[in-house]
Image: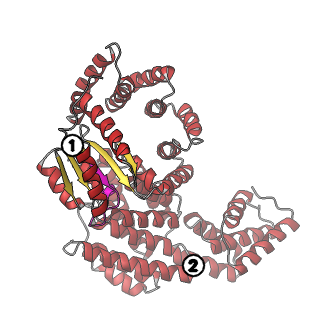
Amino acid sequence: MPPINLTNSKILIVEEQPLALNYIKQSLERLDYQNVKFADSAPLAKEMCVAETFDLIICSFDLSKKQDGYQLYEELKAKRLVRGVTGFIFVSAETSGALVHSVLELQPDDFLVKPFTINDLKSRIERVLKRKRVLRKILTLIDDENDSKALRFINGELDKEGQALTPLLLRLKGDVLLRLKQFEEAKQFFKSALDLQKFTWAKIGLIEALIANNEHVLAHRMLKTLLEKSETRLIALDLLGRLEMQLNQFESAQEFLSQASDMAPRNIERQKSLSRVAQINHDYERSYLAQKDIATFAKNSIHDNPEIYLNAVRAGIDFALSTDQTEQITRITRQTQQYLQDLKKQFPHANNQAQIDVLNARMHYLKDENQKARRLMEQLADEPVIRSIDASLDKAKAYHELGFTHKAQALFGQIITHCERHAKNEDPTTLHYLQQQQAERKEITMGPRELNNHAVNQFNRGQVEVALEAFTQAFRIMPKNASIALNLLQCLLDSSKKGQTFNSNLAGRCVTMLRDTKLEPDQQLRFESILDKLKEMKLSIN
């Protein structure tokens, strides 16, 4: 590579700690960089990026005024204030796994750990700037979404003998082929790249091409090998989660997405997918935890909006309705009230009173204040147009819980029609969840509380068969509720004593759930007693 003068590069330093800022400033002066500007906060950095284009941004993660470095970089990329031709280096004193994995998913050009030496800074800056300078024409074409022309230019550069940037050009070519949806060509290209060298990016690109070509078995096999390596585990988990969602394998999708979200919790889109998949699996606790993470990490970010707080409340109510633990319900209720307060503080002029009324109605229902809940719902106007799927879905749930069955079904139908009409813009997993909810709530006309109470009453009256059917329905929509699982297992046992066929598969699901759950002491004793009776009666479970 011929010598390149880098000292005239336009550099922006984003750092709020005076000592760290002074150190970087002095270091750049010693390295003869003259065209350097400084910002001590994310808002100021955004203003400066609007006003001019920089060759390189060196940004501290540890910003505390409004946004941190992660949120700043995410917004700069989303608003195209930082494009491919601009280098971006993160610096951070924190090196926790969650932070590092989250940052690396944003794909900055480098990550520098504080404290660092002037030589560390020099080598990182030079490497990034040289790369950007040499690849400027290609990166500009990609920035302008002219991928076809970029591909021709990359091929021309690869044909040159002694090309020093061949690995980088190959990687750019693979990305371009995927964006152009030339999946068969991309597949052959990535295989050829792997024949040259076992590039990690080529393995991942090949997997993405295989998934796009519906070659799921081979993609799955390759992803499982990437799980075993720490440097590729996160991307493998993410791709596996997305692949399993595509195949409607929602339980395994939730497991993969949960692990990926634990590794890098700041990925808002993945948390949304996790919450939706958990809803399909009736795992209301996991859905709520995902929405809580979204509310935490979206605040002050480009994702921040009233729906973030409303969805956290909605998920909290769903969770509270699925548990019978009083302390847990109290804690969830307190947290949901806090989210509503945060909403008013963060967005004081938002027009969402109708949505809050629905939430308040559901909270009245949670407290067995059904008349108050019904009055709130009765005064709400029908919406001719679906403006928010989550808001309309919440309203349909409230109608169903309070016995407005026809209204609930009509609204479910309206939401599903809206999603089908706008299928290109909607996540297919959301449509699957809506169809599931409509079918379940049409078949099970009672709300979760009434259903459980009805089952318990029938059981106490000795109506074992009626109770068995009710507990089976309750377990279907609340599969994480230990009390329901215990009651259902007891009903299955009592029903078999009366000569009915023992449902070993259903019993097995109850036992698996109870073994995986931390039970209260009295629940544990009851569970062990039922297991002993099953053993005495020689009833096997699957």
Residue 324's disc number: 2
Q: Locate the N terminus by quadrant.
A: top left
Checking the image for residue 33, the label placed there is: 1
Q: Is residue 528 magenta?
A: no
In terms of secondary structure, where does tag 1 sit? loop
From this viewpoint, which residue is outermost toward the front? 30
Q: Can you say whether 180 is above or below 268 in the image?
A: above
Name above or below for residue 98 compared with residue 369.
Answer: above
Q: Position of residue 306 (x, y in %)?
A: 28, 67
Please name the colour scheme applied to the rendered image.
secondary structure
Mark 1, Cα crowd under 10 Å, few <14 / some 14-19 / many 20+, is some
Residue 521 drawn at (x, y percent): 72, 79
Q: How far across and down, in percent of the image, does residue 38 sit?
A: 20, 55
Which residue appears at 24% of the width and 52% of the height? 25
What is the magenta range?
57-71
Taking 134 as reference, is 485 left or right? Answer: right
In the picture provided, is 527 more to the left or to the right than 345?
right
> Label 1 amino acid?
Tyr
Amino acid marked by disc 2: Asp
Checking the image for residue 318, the label placed there is none
Mark nearest the camera among 1 and 2 is 1
